[in-house]
Every structure is written in structure tokens, then in C-alpha cells.
Amino acid sequence: MTAFVLVPGTHMGGWLWREVAGRLRQAGSEAYEATLTGMGDRRHLAGPQTDLETHTEDLTQLIDHVDAPEVVLVAHCYGSYPVRAAADRRPERVSRIVYVDAPLPQDGCSVLGQVREQMQDEVTRAGMLRRAAEAVDGWRMIPPTPAEERNAANLTGVSQEALVRLNRLAAPQPLGTLTQPLRLSGKTAKMPMTGVFCTAGGPGIAMVETLVASGAPRFQELGEERWSFFELATGHWPMLSCPDELAEVLRQATAGEGRRVGTGRQDADRVAAVQSAQIRSGKPLPRCVVSPGRSRPAWCGGPR
């Protein structure tokens, strides 16, 4: 029996995964909706000392208390940071990491550091850094307002009822979770991983193919057999907009399915075309897989 640990992004509690968890259980799997310290019904436990290490330990303890010999860690957006760190501490217990419209964390980088250096949408980057700078009491970052959410091109498929719940239950994010750098030992370097792109207004698998075809060393791991990819034609919140489809993708990913983007022998014509397009546009190859057209990243960039 597969055991899924479902981890939300910034400002969110485990409640966000309720519908997907129910569908996974109906299919015979175990599902654990993680609520990190300071989020959801644990918001009263947050403090200035709450940081990425706190959330990493939350997940490490949850993994330790699951009876199943292995778990699949599923990360939405910011959740990929504590997920990757917890997997690094318990690699023998984690069979796969699934990134759902989430950043690909980098060792030595903080969330805000990656946003500052790599997020291509200048308006969104500035807004996120502003909210961090204006954190209440110096440590509580207030969630986006409903107006800011409406202006973001990432709500495709989310009902009005779900949107009201999303804004009502959003909790302030402890700033330390976004400023503390991620530290990895390399124990997840060969771990099976899956990226789920939510393509409404954002990139999909084609971007990964382009990055791998470019030959840039930093992207070559995405072409390894251990990586698989899926697309969902929805916005940033698939657990709210299409829980049935997302639950099915998670089951398929666990079974080793999904599209591969093999490196193999590089297609010289394709690489040349990519490089030529970059030269004509005057733009360098993107430093990470982000969607410049929306306020949240599409799979690699910064959090919600």
C-alpha cells in the first residue's frame, strides 16, 4: 500500500489537500495531510524562531511516525523546500518526491534568495519581496489579499467557494521559513522524482525539453530516467480545481509512469535552434523553470 505525505505551500495548512487525500484513500492508499508549524490549525504555534528547519523537522517526524516502510512525498509550491530537506534526512524511507507546480530547491539557497535572483516576473518578484520586508513584527508575512489573488493568472478552475476558503484559512508565513538557506547532503541525488506542471498560463514539459536540449549542465539531471513529468490543464491550485485528476497523476507517478525527457544523444539541430532563438531574442537561457506570466512560479522559481 502506497503512503502519500501531502505538503502544502506558504500560508496553507493540510486542509488544502483534503479532497485529494480522500480520493487516494478511496483508491486504497494511505494519505497524510501535513500541517506545518504555524499553518492551518497550528498557526498559534508560530513564532519568530519558526524557520525552514522547523518545517523540515515537522516532516521528518511525520515520516518517522508513518508505519509504511516507504512514503511518497508530494510538495505544492514552497512545500518543496522542507520536503527536499526531509527526504535528505530520511532517504531510505522516501520512494519518490512529486513536485506539484513547485520550485526545484537548490542547496544553499533560501526561498526568497531564489525569488530575488531567479524569478523573471519583475512585478511579482517586487511584490513578494515587499510583503517580506513589511512582515508584521519583523517575522509574520501576511498572505496575498483577495485582490492580489484575483489578479494572478493562477486561479483557473478554482470555484468561488474554494477561493473564499483559500483566503479565509490562509495564515501568516513565518519569515524564517523563507530566509533560511536549504542545506542538502546529496542523499536525494538519485532519488526518483516527478514534476507536475499546471499549464494554464504557464509552461509545460516542452520547456524541460528545451532546457535539456540546450546542453546546459545544470539542467541535465532533468533528462535522467529517474525524472518523470505530467501536465494538468489547470491553474496553480489543482488540489482545488481538479482533485480527481491530480489524485490519478499521483498514483501514476508512484507507479513509475509519466513522460521522460531523455538526454541521450543531443539533437544538434534542436540545440542550435534553441541557441539561435535565445540570441535573436537577446535573452539568456532561463536560470530556472519559471512562468514569467503569472505571480507564482510554474514548477521552479519561488513559492506561494
Image (cartoon, grey):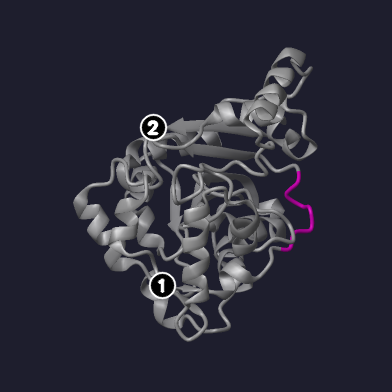
Dominant SS type (magenta): loop
Dot 2 amino acid type: Ala
Circle 2 sits on which residue?
233
Q: Position of residue 56 (x, y in %)?
A: 61, 66
Q: Residue at x 49, y 69 (%)?
A: 130
The correct choice, above or below, for 32 with respect to 280 in the image is below
Q: Is residue 43 left or right of residue 83?
A: left
| Label 2 Cα neighbours within 10 Å, binned few <14 / some 14-19 / many ≥20 | some
- In this rendering, does residue 152 appear at all? yes
Q: Residue at x 40, y 82 (%)?
A: 44
| Label 1 Cα neighbours within 10 Å, binned few <14 / some 14-19 / many ≥20 | some
The stretch in magenta equals 183-189
Q: Residue at x 38, y 32 (%)?
A: 233
In the foreground, 81 or 193: 81
Q: Position of residue 254 (x, y in %)?
A: 54, 37
Q: Position of residue 261 (x, y in %)?
A: 65, 25
SS at circle 1: loop
Q: Residue at x 35, y 60 (%)?
A: 15
SS at circle 2: loop
Dot 1 amino acid type: Ile
Any magenta on residue 107?
no
Circle 1 sits on which residue?
142
